[in-house]
Image (cartoon, rainbow, N blue to C red):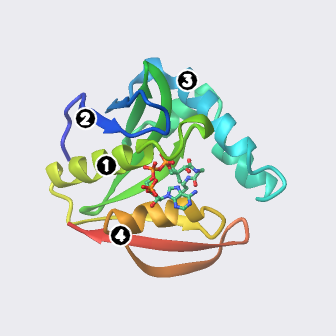
């Protein structure tokens, strides 16, 4: 898999205000850990009461836990106006890449941040000679399902009662 340290992907994000924002996507490093953990907390706290507590606890890592998540995994971080507003993980797996832990700050949604992150993951997977890329998501993450489909991912199955009793939808894009 490609071992390059950074991938910069500027993309114009049309916002509802008159000033367009620029989303910068780079490979996350250890210096991003506090901001990434704070972002996951903001994002998954929104789902308290709607998803099992165990799931939310697992997806809100401490800085130490996130350090171990980074082992063998490439994370891309998105910034708007220098603020970390999005994150995604690319986990190589037998010639394919799994996209995991995609999250965008509630205040930066529908501004192409998620699109820029998933496109960075696709680009990185291609450069890593992966043959396909896939993601697992839950029914409740309707926006993510739309986002993946918009970017060419096709539904390819379900895992039942998989994440703490939640059915998981699997989407893939062959590269
Ligand atoms: C899903 C998520 C990552 C999308 O991020 P985002 O930056 O808002 O996505 P984008 O702005 O790039 O959206 C691209 C397209 O995806 C689709 N989309 C995104 N959010 C959507 C929503 N809430 N409802 C319907 N479609 C949505 C739309 O087609 C959108 O294009 P449009 O804005 O031109 O209509 C973000 O809402 C999020 O973090 N949600 C909570 C956590 C989550 O669901 N993580 C994914 C787990 S698998």
Q: Residues within 10 Å of mark 1 (few under 14, many from 20)?
A: many
In this rendering, position of residue 35 left or right of residue 116: right
* Residue 136 visible (yes or no): no
Q: Say whether marks 3 and 4 touch (CB < 8 Å).
A: no
Q: Position of residue 92 (x, y in %)?
A: 32, 54
Query: Quick one: label 2 or label 3, which is nearer the N terminus?
Result: 2
Q: CA distance from mark 2 to mark 4?
A: 21 Å
| Disc assigned to residue 153 | 4
Q: What is the secondary structure assignment of the residue under circle 1?
A: helix
Q: Residue at x 26, y 32 (%)?
A: 10
Q: CA distance from mark 2 to mark 1?
A: 11 Å
Question: Is 31 in front, or is 139?
Answer: 139
Query: Quick one: label 4 or label 1, which is nearer the N terminus?
Result: 1
Q: Which residue is the extreme one toward the right?
A: 49
Question: Is 111 in front, or is 96?
Answer: 111
| Disc assigned to residue 35 | 3
According to the picture, the residue beneath numbered tag 1 turns out to be 121
| Disc assigned to residue 9 | 2
Q: Quadrant of the C terminus?
A: bottom left
Q: CA distance from mark 4 to mark 1?
A: 13 Å
Cβ of mark 1 under 8 Å from ligand 1: the answer is: no
Q: Residue at x 73, y 71 (%)?
A: 165
């Amino acid at each position: 898999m490609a071992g390059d340290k950074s991938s910069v992907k500027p993309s114009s994000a049309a916002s509802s205000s008159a000033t367009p924002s620029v989303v910068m996507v780079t490979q996350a490093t250890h210096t991003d850990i506090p901001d990434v953990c704070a972002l996951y907390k903001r994002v998954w706290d929104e789902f308290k009461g709607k998803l099992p507590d165990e799931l939310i606890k697992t997806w809100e890592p401490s800085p130490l836990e996130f350090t171990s998540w980074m082992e063998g995994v490439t994370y891309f971080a998105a910034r708007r106006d220098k603020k970390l507003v999005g994150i995604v993980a690319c986990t190589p797996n037998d010639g394919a890449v799994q996209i995991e832990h995609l999250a965008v700050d509630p205040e930066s949604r529908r501004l192409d941040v998620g699109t820029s992150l998933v496109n960075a993951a696709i680009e990185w997977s291609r450069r890593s000679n992966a043959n396909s890329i896939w993601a697992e998501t839950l029914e409740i993450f309707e926006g993510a399902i739309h986002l993946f489909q918009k970017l060419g991912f096709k539904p390819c199955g379900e895992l039942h009662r998989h994440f703490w009793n939640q059915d998981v939808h699997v989407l893939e894009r062959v590269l």
